[in-house]
Image (cartoon, grey):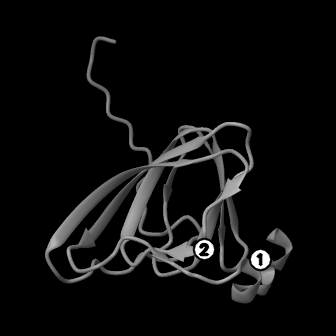
Amino acid sequence: MDKIESVTLIETTKSWNGKALPQYPKGKPKVTILKITIPPHSRLNIHKHPVINAGVLTKGELTVVDEENNTLQLKAGDALVELVNSCHFGENNGDSPAEIIVFYAGTDALPITVEENRKFSECYSAWKTTE
């Protein structure tokens, strides 16, 4: 490769399910970058993010499901803009770990993730079939 190349992976004003992103929160800006590894045949707890975030799946495959049962299938190299203040979960149905790098644009006063400590079937009827 002889020249510098820049490729836009994603640019949007909406999250992956088509809902508009909210305004950035007021406060002192805080950027967090996480590398999250999800073991094969496992599911993340139901959670939500109070801040705008985006990620790139670097390894494996991942299925993301929102509270309306919208589903996004990701494979290595895919980018997404996550949901904000909306419950969802991710699930690795594959035989190898899924790894995602996630960038959070928040404030020093807000958490980046809030877990919902309920069973899937207690939250959303659409998720009853996933237990």
Q: Residue furthest left?
A: 28
Q: Rounded to the nearest whole Å, what is the CA distance between mark 1 and mark 2? A: 10 Å
Q: Which residue is denoted by mark 2 in the rendering?
A: 46
Check disc 1 and give the amino acid type: Trp
Residue 30's quadrant in the figure?
Answer: bottom left
- The x, y position of residue 77, in whole percent, is 53, 38
Mark 1 and mark 2 residues within 8 Å of each other at the beta carbon: yes
Q: Quadrant of the N terminus?
A: top left
Q: Quadrant of the C terminus?
A: bottom right
Residue 46's quadrant in the figure?
Answer: bottom right
Q: Nearer the viewer, residue 124 or 120?
A: 120
In this image, 111 relative to 9: left or right?
left
Q: Which residue is denoted by mark 1 in the rendering?
A: 127
Residue 103's quadrant in the figure?
Answer: bottom left
- The x, y position of residue 36, in whole percent, is 47, 50
In this image, 44 relative to 25: left or right?
right
- The x, y position of residue 100, in whole percent, is 49, 47
Residue at 73% of width from left, 49% of height from top? 41
Residue at 50% of width from left, 71% of height from top? 83
- The x, y position of residue 126, in whole percent, is 79, 80
Q: Nearer the viewer, residue 36 or 107?
A: 36
